[in-house]
Image (spheres, helix red, strand yellow):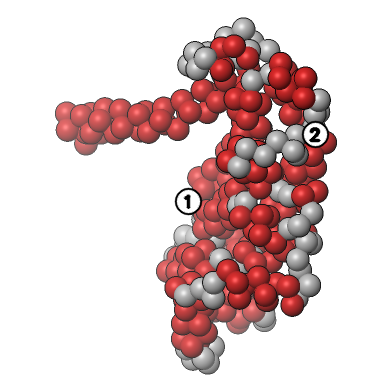
């Protein structure tokens, strides 16, 4: 009966309107970018494109996908995101699992926890970081785009709190009584229950690696190793078109706005495609972790 009350119907209507406005505010810019990328030069340069393309043409996408530098950067981003996300999640899970134990089980737990929190609050700065990476011989390598961000303390704290509050202690104790070790307990007890938290931090990590562009500018001298976000930053923000590697006459026939829009839209596609699969894990994980009496 509570779901049929007038107050509940009013709340549902207001909540629906708010969520619709938030959804449209996220979707409309994407539709506009797509419309610009599909419009012809004159319409894009005159800023006449709204939510629908004018005189549809795919020349901007042909130019973008036909550019070997863009394709190489796209592959670099895919490799970096897959390797970086997998490595970061593995490290984060192991740290959070260890720090979720009580002081009696893990001596020095509080000291290690404060050590990690300190690194989140205080940073050594760009120059010391650059010198350290140089001494480790990571400059101008693939791993310089992966290792510096592999340990995300914020994600570690999220997962640590989830382990401590949402994983029943009786389950881990039962695993130890049955002869399981720490790794068996982590894999067979903690991880299945923690799917919502793992999906959340995986999404944060994936988007972070995919969108991060600064390390490519600072630590890479070889532009062939640029991830897509760094390449887009040099083209769109710095207005450096030397990496386009196309005939100037072809560029003159196509609006720079449509080319930029096509590159931005292509860069958004992987995250847009991955999110629904992680959303499925959010929903599935809601029913996990219950203890049957």
Mark 2 residue crowding within 10 angstroms, few (<14) / some (14–19) / many (20+): few
Which residue carries the number 1 mark? 286
The answer to which image quadrant residue 59 occupies is top right
In the rendered image, residue 100, in percent from the top left (x then y), is placed at 50, 77
Residue drawn at 45 percent across, 32 percent down = 26
Which residue carries the number 2 mark? 245
Secondary structure state at the residue bearing disc 1: loop
Taking the image as shown, residue 93 lies to the left or right of residue 103, namely right
In the rendered image, residue 194, in percent from the top left (x then y), is placed at 54, 60
In the rendered image, residue 137, in percent from the top left (x then y), is placed at 78, 72
Residue drawn at 67 percent across, 75 percent down = 131
Residue drawn at 56 percent across, 12 percent down = 43
Please state, as top left, top right, bottom left or bottom right, where the C terminus lies in the image. Answer: bottom left
Secondary structure state at the residue bearing disc 2: loop
152 w.r.t. 229: above or below: below
Give 76 or 225, whichever is nearer the viewer.
225
């Amino acid at each position: 009966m509570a779901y049929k009350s007038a107050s509940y119907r009013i709340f549902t209507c207001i909540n629906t309107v708010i969520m619709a406005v938030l959804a449209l505010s996220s979707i409309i810019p994407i539709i506009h970018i797509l419309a610009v990328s599909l419009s012809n030069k004159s319409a894009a340069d005159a800023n006449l494109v709204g939510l629908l393309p004018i005189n549809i043409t795919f020349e901007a996408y042909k130019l973008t996908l036909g550019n070997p530098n863009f394709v190489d950067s796209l592959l670099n981003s895919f490799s970096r995101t897959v390797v970086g996300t997998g490595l970061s999640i593995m490290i984060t899970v192991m740290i959070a699992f260890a720090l979720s134990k009580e002081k009696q089980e893990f001596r020095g737990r509080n000291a290690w926890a404060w050590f990690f929190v300190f690194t989140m609050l205080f940073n050594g700065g760009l120059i010391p970081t650059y010198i350290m990476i140089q001494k480790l011989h990571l400059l101008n390598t693939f791993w310089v785009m992966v290792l510096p961000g592999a340990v995300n303390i914020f994600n570690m704290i999220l997962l640590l709190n989830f382990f401590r509050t949402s994983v029943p202690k009786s389950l881990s104790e039962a695993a130890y009584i049955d002869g399981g070790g720490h790794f068996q307990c982590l894999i067979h007890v903690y991880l299945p229950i923690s799917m919502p938290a793992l999906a959340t931090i995986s999404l944060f990590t994936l988007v972070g690696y995919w969108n991060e562009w600064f390390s490519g500018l600072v630590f890479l001298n070889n532009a062939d190793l640029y991830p897509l976000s760094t390449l887009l930053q040099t083209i769109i923000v710095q207005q450096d078109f030397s990496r386009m590697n196309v005939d100037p006459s072809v560029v003159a026939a196509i609006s720079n706005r449509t080319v930029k829009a096509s590159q931005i839209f292509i860069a958004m596609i992987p995250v847009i495609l991955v999110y629904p699969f992680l959303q499925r894990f959010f929903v599935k994980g809601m029913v996990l972790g219950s203890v049957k009496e």
